[in-house]
Image (cartoon, grey):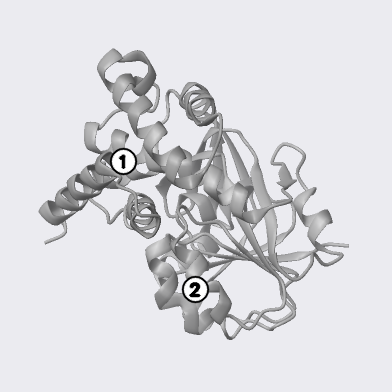
Amino acid sequence: MTYRVGIIGAGALGLLYAGLLRTNVTLYTRTKEQADIITKKGGITVVVDGVKTHTDVHATPITEADFTAMDLIIITVKSYQLEDLMDTLTRIPTNTPLLFLQNGIAHLALLPNLPQKNILLGTCEHGAGKIDATTVVWRGAGQTNWAVYRGEPNEALYPIMMSNPAFPFLQQADFKEMVYNKLLANAVINPLTAVLGVQNGALIHNESWNELLVKLTREVADILGLENALEKVTAICKATSANFSSMATDVREKRKTEIASISGAVVKLAQEQGKVAPISETLYGLVKGLEGEYLQ
């Protein structure tokens, strides 16, 4: 049986999942232009170590989306784009599972407003870079962690997630712990690399930057209540040493970042706990300042 998966968001992450899931995929794009290009080229191209692999993918603008008969909808848009998408998401049949793949934790506040019975949260460890409307570079293989936020998995979910052994999904027991571990890495690596304009590995190899990474990791881990935080962050920096973080890429390409849902969320949690987060607060201001320079 071939299962049908809809992916909302045709950025790097959306293209990667569309190109690597071995199912019948429909990619819902923000613009008609991108949908037309994908249709014309007959799908998505994933580049790994210079080798191109083409996958047949359907594409349609989100404004023309028909979500009926889908076994799973994966939402890969940026966290700050979700609020504008809420009306669209409420039109998805209530028995269709939704899987959210956003950085930070800001999206958690929106989920209770959705009517779907089964909502899943995920975190992505893969590195991806969008080349053009139909091409994505798979820059680092990892896994997709996922956990149940509400409801329970349906019978189609596991076959979908096991469709490509080279693109694994791993179920986690506690969505909050999973999301907080991802937030830890994002809140340390992303803003530092965005401000410095460096690859992740530079935070390990440069003594001064590593000292700052250590201090920031301690700050964030204390607020999130996580143990062995420095080991986790250091391991991610080493594993992705040649990659630019998504936030560093956004700043380099003069796009809006997810700083509000990452460092901003950490600062807000600190305030709720009666704590201070001076490094996170400073980085938040620096990245927002960079945005302000090029988003005028």
| 229 relative to 182, above or below | above
- Identified by mark 2, the residue type is Leu
Residue 255 lies, in percent from the top left, at: 27, 53
Image position of 201 (left or right of 93): left
Residue 230 lies, in percent from the top left, at: 48, 26
Image position of 17 (left or right of 287): right
Q: Residue at x 75, y 44 (%)?
A: 164
* Quarter of the N terminus within the rendering: bottom right
Q: Nearer the viewer, residue 204 or 246?
A: 204
Say whether marks 2 and 1 touch (CB < 8 Å). Answer: no
Query: Dot 2 corresponds to which residue?
Result: 110
Give SS at disc 1.
Answer: helix
Q: Residue at x 33, y 20 (%)?
A: 210
Query: Dot 1 corresponds to which residue?
Result: 191
Image position of 237 (left or right of 291): right
Give SS at disc 2.
Answer: loop
Q: Nearer the viewer, residue 153 or 23?
A: 153
Point out the tag, 2 or 1, that comes first from the N-terminus: 2
Q: Nearer the viewer, residue 186 or 59?
A: 186
Q: Residues within 10 Å of mark 2 (few under 14, many from 20)?
A: few
Residue 161 lies, in percent from the top left, at: 76, 52
Extreme-front residue of the structure: 274
Viewer can see residue 213: yes
Residue 222 lies, in percent from the top left, at: 44, 40
- Identified by mark 1, the residue type is Pro
Quadrant of residue 269 in the image? bottom left
Q: Residue at x 31, y 20 (%)?
A: 211
Viewer can see residue 253: no
* Quarter of the C terminus within the rendering: bottom left
